[in-house]
């Protein structure tokens, strides 16, 4: 009798532990499960539109296939993103997360030569940097200070717009950031790498369309 009661109590627990739903939740971080069960921005955009870039990438090792599409406005900002992914929970979660992160990012990337009148601005920035470093560290520690280099690079990035430089913000999304946000295990890092590759592929497709559009405009004007 006691054995029968124990069997009735344990059997449902065993079924729950061995169920696919429980296995998924136990293997993946809660953020991955959230994106897997409630994926963001699933769907497609008009791939024939000149403002839409499409990236299709795959990982032969695991069979994951990821399609990412971005829509860019006239100011060079990504206003929409959609994805369709065939793969594991980590691949789907990485795709879903990327579509959220990429919105609002700039795709502009150009540089202008620094003219002579802007040199005083650069000198001023360098003087501000040197002063801030001297306040924190002795002069002889400058080349040994990681904190000093971080401050210097940060200052340069802030000064880029003054000299005509613009950074492609969409390319600042790295696979390491995706993996960290989703707490992906080492065996699933290829999913975050696939998501980064999808961003680059979508951007490349968008750029090719823009170049083709400029060529057609030149031909039409002639």
Image (spheres, helix red, strand yellow):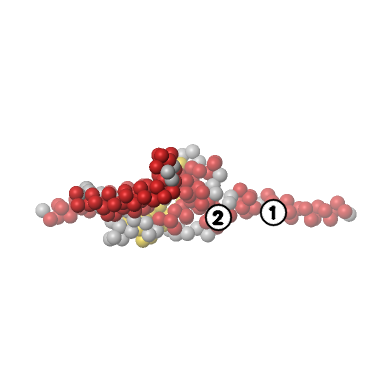
Instruction: Give how far across and how far down residue 47 sits, in percent.
Output: 33, 55
The first of marks 1 and 2 along the sequence is 1
Q: Is residue 59 above or below residue 206?
A: above
Looking at the image, which residue is at 73% across and 54% down? 13
Looking at the image, which residue is at 64% across and 53% down? 22
Which one is nearer the viewer's eye here, 161 or 200?
A: 161
* Residue 54 visible, this orientation: no
Disc 1 or disc 2, which is closer to the eye? 2
Instruction: Count every numbered label the image shows and give the total.
Output: 2
Looking at the image, which residue is at 58% across and 50% down? 28
Which one is nearer the viewer's eye here, 84 or 119?
A: 119
Give the side of residue 90 with respect to residue 146, left or right.
right
- C-alpha separation, residue under disc 1 versus residue under disc 2: 21 Å
Residue lying at the far left of the rendered structure? 222
Q: Disc 1 vs disc 2: Cβ atoms closer than 8 Å?
A: no
Check disc 1 and report the residue beneath it: 16
Mark 2 neighbour class, 10 Å CA radius: few under 14, some 14 to 19, many 20 or more: some
Check disc 2 and report the residue beneath it: 31
Give the side of residue 133 with respect to residue 88, left or right.
left
Instruction: Give how far across and how far down residue 8 sits, in percent.
Output: 80, 55
Looking at the image, which residue is at 50% across and 41% down? 62
Which one is nearer the viewer's eye here, 207 or 77?
A: 77
* Residue 100 visible, this orientation: yes
SS at mark 1 in the image: helix
Instruction: Give how far across and how far down residue 88 sits, in percent.
Output: 53, 48
Which one is nearer the viewer's eye here, 141 or 164?
A: 141
């Amino acid at each position: 009798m006691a054995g029968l009661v124990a069997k009735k109590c344990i059997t449902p627990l065993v079924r729950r532990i061995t169920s696919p739903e429980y296995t998924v939740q136990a293997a993946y971080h809660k953020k991955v499960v959230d994106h897997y069960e409630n994926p963001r921005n699933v769907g497609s955009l008009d791939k024939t539109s000149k403002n839409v870039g499409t990236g299709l990438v795959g990982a032969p090792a695991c069979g994951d296939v990821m399609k990412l599409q971005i829509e860019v406005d006239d100011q060079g900002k990504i206003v929409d993103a959609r994805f369709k992914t065939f793969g594991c929970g980590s691949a789907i979660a990485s795709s879903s997360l990327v579509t959220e992160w990429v919105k609002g990012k700039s795709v502009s990337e150009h540089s202008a030569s620094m003219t002579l009148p802007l040199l005083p601005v650069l000198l001023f920035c360098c003087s501000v940097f040197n002063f801030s470093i001297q306040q924190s560290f002795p002069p002889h520690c400058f080349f040994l200070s990681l904190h000093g280099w971080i401050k210097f690079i940060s200052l340069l990035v802030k000064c880029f717009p003054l000299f005509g430089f613009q950074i492609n913000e969409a390319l600042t999304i790295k696979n390491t950031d995706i993996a960290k946000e989703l707490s992906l295990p080492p065996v699933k890092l290829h999913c975050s790498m696939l998501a980064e590759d999808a961003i680059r592929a979508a951007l490349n497709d968008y750029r090719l369309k823009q170049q083709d559009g400029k060529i057609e405009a030149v031909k039409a004007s002639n």
